[in-house]
Image: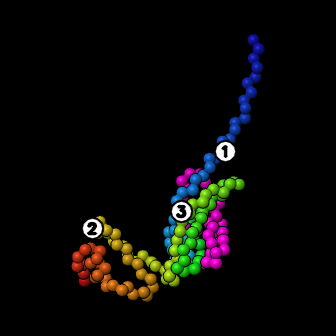
Amino acid sequence: MNSSPCLAAPAQKEPPSQPLLGELTASHVGPDSVQLEWSVPEGSFDSFTVQYKDAQGQPQVVPVDGGLRTVTVPGLSPSRRYKFNLYGVWGRKRLGPMSTDAVTGEGRNWHLVGSGFAAGRNLNVACAGDLVFPWQWEQLLGAFFGKDPLIAA
């Protein structure tokens, strides 16, 4: 009986599956900057690029490391709408874009100073430096709770 040696073919390595870009959002918007956040629900990218047009209409590119999921775009003009396009770079391929719009603030940074929940409604209170709101706190709370608020001393 003749037996022939079994030749095994070398195992072929499966190429990694193409990554996916998730949702792109503008999470923090100031008068001169926008922080962008995104997800990568599947796979990983080598790097990212954010593209937008500046106030003069000139294209701008912000390179981002592949391990990051957030970037702050500085040097923007106040009270202006920007469209941001995010591309993922994977090998020699550029995937995307995912897009979002943001309008920069009017020259003041707004900060959340308090929040609450009552009667199924959310209340967020923000301030901008020394800005004085045109309403009284009692009116704001009354509108939120739907009645005259009880002020505890």
Choose between 81 and 50: the one closer to the eye: 81
Decide whether residue 71 is among the magenta residues: no
Would residue 31 be seen by someone viewing this image from the given angle?
no
Q: Residues within 10 Å of mark 3 (few under 14, many from 20)?
A: many
Q: Earlier in the sequence, mark 1 or mark 2?
A: 1
- Quarter of the picture holding the C terminus: bottom left
Residue at left 52%, top 59%? Answer: 23
Q: Quadrant of residue 10?
A: top right
Residue at left 50%, top 79%? Answer: 105
Residue at left 51%, top 83%? Answer: 107
Which amino acid type is shown beneath numbered disc 1? Pro
Q: Residues within 10 Å of mark 1 (few under 14, many from 20)?
A: few
- The spot of residue 7 in percent (x, y) is 74, 27
Which amino acid type is shown beneath numbered disc 2? Ala
Would residue 56 be seen by someone viewing this image from the given angle?
yes
- The spot of residue 38 in percent (x, y) is 54, 62
Q: CA distance from mark 2 to mark 3?
A: 32 Å
Q: Is 29 left, or right, of 43 in this rendering?
A: left
- Quarter of the picture holding the N terminus: top right
Q: From the viewer's perspective, is residue 106 above or below residue 116?
A: below
Q: What stretch of residues is rendered in magenta?
A: 36-64
**Mark 2: which secondary structure?**
loop
Q: Which residue is mark 3?
A: 24
Q: Earlier in the sequence, mark 2 or mark 3?
A: 3
Decide whether residue 42 is among the magenta residues: yes
Q: Which residue is mark 1?
A: 15
Q: Which residue is mark 2?
A: 119
Which amino acid type is shown beneath numbered disc 3? Leu
Q: CA distance from mark 1 to mark 2?
A: 53 Å
**Mark 3: which secondary structure?**
strand
